[in-house]
């Protein structure tokens, strides 16, 4: 079960390993120094590697229902104003989960080039009317990266497949986020073994490029998960079939956690989400 | 343990897999586009594939007991009115679990052709008297589908067995819902292997067609379970024997979760459920 | 690991399985139709198969301590009256666990020939003074059955051993209930394999017939456990040795859950339990 | 994996097993009937087998901070008085965990010859000022027994080692309690196999007799654990090394639960504990 | 699977084991008796072995938002004063996690030569304005020790690698703490086997000496974890790559728990943390 022979290790391979790891770090460090813009551009930050994503799920407390109507109704404008004030630091999306999830009523997805900026925004939100009536039910933090496996070099066929189609459906009504944790056996595989499994994973997903949008965040070490997978779709039945495909490949045997919680919600402007909760 | 050979995958099978998955998606996509009716018909929506089912379990808060009697007594009429207002969008069933379950007192089963319509109804319910005194304890979401395994083509004998008998008992007094999650080994089996296990699973259930009604919802990817199995019966002892039969077949070895929670309740009109809770 | 050969199943065994299961259901269905009496007789309902047992554990809320003394003191009489009103429908036992268990202060064991009658009683209890100050911490539901394995036919020696001695100790002061869930391998064994393990399980218990009373409830499918095992004793040290014996046999390797929670309490009349909590 | 051959069992061994178990029970039953004294003597009850130990962990509720200072300050005297009133029935120790544990602020260790006496004391405590402001966070119940494995007969060398040294350090400032649950494989081993593992377990502990005091309670069947291990020390670093020794032997492979919770606290008189919490 | 032969053990090895363990304890006992200083020096206590570290995570209760502004604003000065009063007994760091973690808003890391001094400080904090509005969400206790494996004697190459570079980045903005629990197989390995795995673990970390600071606490037996690993960095992307390296070695297969919770926060003075929470 162990990949290294103890004797080999003791007999001089240490220096090699040390050297290798120094080289290894050099590459991602270079690749991950994004230029921090003075104003956040939606299309840009959503496409770049090296961006932090903070997912925060909230549940309204019973006292929200007892708050004066004016206070509840003012909450939407208050959130809009807060988002405007922080627009140079964070990109903010809000989703409605009330009625579809047990543990939370709405959730934020916040993007930032520096994680402490996202923290500052979320902290400020906690001081708003809505924030003061809400409990945090879940927080997930990740970083965007360039593709790890299905690159032009390592898997040219699938890499080209990934750019052969784009989303053509109606504006997505639904959002799904699924945290993932892999087992130690996964991380102990060689890159070639993981590449083969990721190719098996990727192949059936190509057919869904037209009706499901996806985004990936890497979380190992900065959270208790390895990945956050994020989806938008208008066709939940197609999405459900996509997920069955992903359950049916060898990679799934390495999932210690896949979901738990799976978050299913609907997509609206932040104002609409707050208004729906204030009704 | 892995079903694919890494080398094979790398040597050109990728294109085939891509093609296969495009074909695969084409079929269910076509089969799952229901006609959305202007008014929900009970018999029709309960029989059709492509219908969303939302199960929501609620627990009354202690403050419910302290609410004025008039307010509590008005809650039944308020719910009836809400169901009437949403009758073009959702079919609503309510069940009584107080006295039989720890975590919740009553639960909703809501059917809709579009999931956001079910969300809107459940959100509106949260603003009613009963909703404002309740905490959500559990939410499960699934989609109905045509039979996957025991079809006329794949398993003609059992398929004909399934239509050889129907429920002949008294109007069912009891409802049981059981969420199911299967392991990665299950999803990684070939369709023939799963068919054989589902035949072993189905055979002993035929004898219970006369005293247990069943319905199945598919949840992979839109919830943290794979299936919601729903039962109605007037004979809990027969039902209990049915469940022992289902525990005693090979498929059960692939259950990561079977129940947890098993929900056992009694069947009444929505008004009766609310009245029982208001006493 | 699978007990059936897929090919065999496909080649015509299905009809046989269907037939077998129809026969199977016929037997317990007949054996389980008790005559419903107009008044519940304690000795009779505790001895019969086909009886529902509902275990409900309650924890007092902090506001109980703040309730007026008169209200607290009246709670015992109120419960006595409620039990009297429902005496044709349910047999009610109440036990004191405060001081011995973390999650609950007292618990009910309710027997009924029809489960909805037990639900109605427990619902009515929730409206009493004590019920309104309590939270449900645990509910377990089961059905009594005739012996499954250690019958006169299948295991005559042990069957006769079971009737060779009865409880001879003082009136039991202590009650213990232990829910059990078995693994899929257990349910997939042949009846002979399970019989052999149950014989190994039963043999060391005979010595404790004189100082530990037992009762078994079957829960598969109507709850998230397979069995509720219930004990009364005045000699907890003998009971503890009995439980070590049961841990030391092969059957224990098939316990997914054994306890969790083990409930340990003392036996009193319902009035005494409420008075002890009202002090 | 199974220790018995099914055929053997069926062919006449049953009578033997029955006889053996009757003999088995006779021995511990005799060994465990302590003389109940009219007044509890600390040194005696802490040394005897057949004594019940009840561990109860409490967390103060936020309203404790808001209680009038006089009420908080009177709580220490109230507890002292209660302990005095029950001194013929129970021996009471109280420990301070606030600042070292998340889930509780203080805990009781109560010894009694009859478990219902311990329950009565703990119930009475719940009615005191401190008890009414506290939530129970954990309860563990066990019984003391004579040594099971490292006896003069079975393991004379280690048995003599156990009495070759006693605690010589300063009065212990620290208390640690660790509940243990063993797996089914452990309980299914022969006594010789378990003895060998317990000898491996005991050997490295001898060196710590001088700086760590220990006591063992047996809980199988009366709680959801098998043992409560209790330690007092003034040298937490030595204690930590002892625990690493115990982690490093084969017995540790049979721990389903070891800790969870590990309770670490400081040792004071009951008065001092309450005063510290009242500050 | 067992490391010892039962027969060998019984035939005389016991005396040897006893002797060996007495020697074993002698060494760490000597190495771990630090001189207790009259005033805590930050650089010294952070570098020494035999120092206790107490990590305590807190969540503000909803009533904090409703406290008078003056009270909230005074909390920072109150904490500063408390830290000053205890400066001879403890070294106190406070970190801000609100916005990044679900379960807590801020956490303390307290160092002390005697654990009861840390307890006294944390108890005193609970009586402050901030403490009275907070719930403890997590407590972890550990002890610092000299290197166990990568010593000059056992692994000279890597030991020299560890001192070949130091942190050269900007003042760290981020803190991460990760509790670890290892499995019984880990603790049952020989020292050589563990050394080999720790060398494989250490090699890839050398490259990150320049941008990630680390500190290790040992917790076996005094908490339900084996280690607390503590990191400071200004480069979370480098840190995330470091953690992927640590996931990808054989040692990771022995982690029963790695994180759960992973704590991610930002580094500020205690005053700043309280002010940020009081806004």
Image: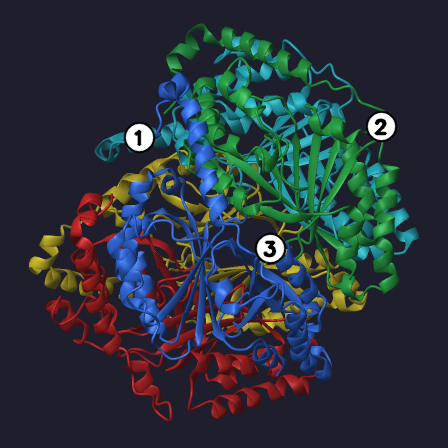
Chain colours: A cyan, B green, C blue, D red, E yellow
Q: CA distance from mark 2 to mark 3?
A: 38 Å
Residue found at the far right of this picture: A70
Q: Which residue bears the numbered disc 1?
A: A3
Q: Which residue bears the numbered disc 2?
A: B39
Quarter of the image containing the C terminus of chain A? top right
Q: Residues within 10 Å of mark 1 (few under 14, many from 20)?
A: few
Q: Residues within 10 Å of mark 3 (few under 14, many from 20)?
A: some
Give the mark toward the camera: 1 or 3: 3
Q: CA distance from mark 1 to mark 3?
A: 61 Å
**Chain under disc 1:** A
Q: Nearer the viewer, residue C59 or C207?
A: C207
Secondary structure, mark 1, is loop
**Above-or-below relation of B116 to C160:** above
Answer whether labels 2 and 1 touch (C-beta < 8 Å). Answer: no
**Chain under disc 3:** C
Tag shown at residue C114: 3
Quarter of the image containing the N terminus of chain A? top left
* Residue E39 shows in the view: no
Residue visible at 48% across and 22% down? A249
Residue visible at 55% across and 26% down? A30
Secondary structure, mark 2, is loop
Q: CA distance from mark 2 to mark 1?
A: 63 Å
Give the mark toward the camera: 2 or 1: 2
Q: Residue D188: image x %, image y %?
A: 25, 53
Q: Is residue B250 left or right of residue E94?
A: left
């Amino acid at each position: 079960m162990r990949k290294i022979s103890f004797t080999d290790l003791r007999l001089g391979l240490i220096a090699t390993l040390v050297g290798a790891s120094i080289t290894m770090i050099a590459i991602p460090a270079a690749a991950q120094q994004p230029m921090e813009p003075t104003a956040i551009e939606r299309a840009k930050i959503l496409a770049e590697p090296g961006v932090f994503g903070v997912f925060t799920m909230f549940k309204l407390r019973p006292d929200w229902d007892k708050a004066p109507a004016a206070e509840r109704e003012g909450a939407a404008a208050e959130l809009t104003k807060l988002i405007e004030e922080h627009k140079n630091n964070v990109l903010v999306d809000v989703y409605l989960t009330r009625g579809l999830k047990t543990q939370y009523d709405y959730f934020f997805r916040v993007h930032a080039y520096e994680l402490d900026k996202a923290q500052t925004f979320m902290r400020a939100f906690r001081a708003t009317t809505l924030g003061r009536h809400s409990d945090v039910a879940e927080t997930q933090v990740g970083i965007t990266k360039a593709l790890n496996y299905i690159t032009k070099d390592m898997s040219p066929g699938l890499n080209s497949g990934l750019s052969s189609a784009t989303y053509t459906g109606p504006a997505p009504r639904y959002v799904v986020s699924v945290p993932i944790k892999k087992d130690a056996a996964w991380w102990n595989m060689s890159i070639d073994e993981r590449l083969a499994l990721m190719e098996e994973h990727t192949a059936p997903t190509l057919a869904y490029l037209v009706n499901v949008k996806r985004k990936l965040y890497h979380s190992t070490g900065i959270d208790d998960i390895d990945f956050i997978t994020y989806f938008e779709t208008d066709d939940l039945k197609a999405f459900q079939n996509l997920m069955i495909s992903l359950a049916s490949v060898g990679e799934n045997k390495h999932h210690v956690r896949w979901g738990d919680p799976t978050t299913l919600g609907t997509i609206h402007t932040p104002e609409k989400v707050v208004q729906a909760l204030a009704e």
